Amino acid sequence: MTGTESEFLAACRRRQSGVPVWFMRQAGRSLPEYRAIRTGIGMLESCTRPDLVTEITLQPVRRHGVDAAIFYSDIMVPLKAIGVDLEIVSGTGPVIADPIRSRSDLDQLRALEPGDVSYVTEAVTALVGELGNTPLIGFAGAPFTLASYLIEGGPSKDYAKTKAMMVAEPALWDVLCTRLADLSAAFLRVQLEAGASAIQLFDSWAGSLSAEDYARSVQPHSARVLAQVAEYDVPRIHFGVGTGELLGLFGAAGADVVGVDWRIPLAEASRRLGPDYAVQGNLDPALLTAPWPVIADRVRAVIRSGAAAPGHIFNLGHGVPPTADPSVLGRIVDLVHGEGTALRSAAADLASAR
Ligand code: CP3
């Protein structure tokens, strides 16, 4: 198996030789070919068309030569597929027609059957064929992040209604998050059954929580998702923004790789996680607009810091902004591929000499 193992999967399993790289939101508005193909087609509609999903997923792989593809879809797709009335508004994000505030609102949430998302099965199957040895990452939203959209009704700055339900109505919260956990697990299983070779669980907004609240009210539900895909024996990546204080809990939820944003050096993230986890990250996406020599120095610094971890997949600390210049992303890929192996082994030698 090791003979054909991609650098991405090797890094997830903490046995890489080089440094693999991909970008969260690599498919999307930073690419002119994406904007062109999406003209006149809504975001959620595009996710239901296997021809478009396949093409959009492949666009950044072709253009940038990244080491992994991420399935083009959205964390809200399984909710839409079970009939929740929602839209994704460009420039805003997910907007829910009837936010969940009480027990009876939970009637909106039934179980997901594979037949509800046959377009996902079709697209993943086609992609796995097209991608050859390049791994396809499947993904889903974690219960907290999904719940935050359902309860707030849309994007939020403080998650006040979400946290109020979590703390004041723990029984309702647990039923809601259990249903969302099973929904996300079902969505991941569809992607895995069709041949995805890794998964990422996005708990983008969990960093808004204290470690105590996260541990009590959120981690068990994310662990429920990750446990339901354990049998596939593929790497499980667990990501959130602003989660420096939660990293140990993110790992312990059942991850193999923990995604780290730009607020904490990878070496420190790895120290907090211990030797059993690879890390993924963590160039600040805001720096993509800086002059190239500045970016290049930061890319090298990320690789050196990541060398302290037993596995490192290069990525941004969050998604590619729509304003990013795609040629800069391509230069980053070339730099990571060109210098990654040497930088990582030199930094590791230096550390062991200390
Ligand atoms: O390239 C990839 O990363 C794969 C596709 C992907 C999308 N969404 C496509 C998308 C993935 C992995 C997601 C996950 C997702 N969706 C998350 C977790 C990751 C994160 O960014 O933290 C979240 C929170 C969502 C919800 C969501 N969907 C938001 C906040 C937005 C942006 C709204 C905006 O216009 O600013 C979306 C829309 C979305 N999802 C776009 C894409 C390419 C932009 C849609 C467009 O073209 O208008």
Image (spheres, rainbow, N blue to C red):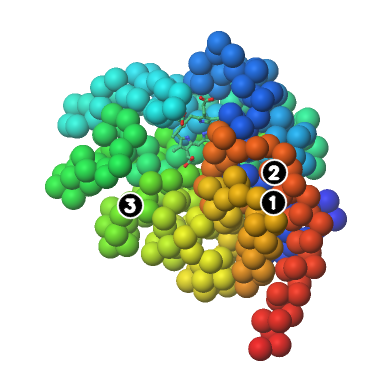
Q: Secondary structure at mark 1?
A: helix
- Residue 201, compared with residue 343, is above or below; it is above
For the residue marked with disc 3, what is the amino acid?
A: Ser
**Which residue has dot 2 on it?**
328
Task: Give x and y (percent) for residue 90.
Answer: 45, 24
**Which residue has dot 1 on it?**
292
Marker disc for residue 208 = 3
Q: Is residue 82 left or right of residue 157?
A: right
Q: Residues within 10 Å of mark 3 (few under 14, many from 20)?
A: some
Task: Determine if residue 245 is in view.
Answer: yes
User: Looking at this rendering, what residue extends furthest in the top direction?
Assistant: 40
Q: Is residue 130 left or right of residue 103?
A: right
Q: Is mark 3 within 8 Å of ligand 1?
A: no
Q: Is mark 2 within 8 Å of ligand 1?
A: no
Q: Residues within 10 Å of mark 2 (few under 14, many from 20)?
A: some
Q: Work out whether mark 3 precedes mark 1 in sequence or the reverse, and give the earlier one.
A: 3
Marker disc for residue 128 = none
For the residue marked with disc 2, what is the amino acid?
A: Val
- Residue 114, compared with residue 259, is above or below; it is above
User: Looking at this rendering, what residue extends furthest in the bottom direction?
Assistant: 354
Q: Secondary structure at mark 2?
A: helix
Q: Is residue 316 left or right of residue 179?
A: right
Q: Residue at x 68, y 37 (%)?
A: 326
Location of the N terminus (image quadrant): bottom right
**For discs 1 and 2, the disc positioned in front in the rendered view:** 1
Q: Work out whether mark 1 precedes mark 2 in sequence or the reverse, and give the earlier one.
A: 1
Q: Residues within 10 Å of mark 1 (few under 14, many from 20)?
A: some
Q: Work out whether mark 2 precedes mark 3 in sequence or the reverse, and give the earlier one.
A: 3
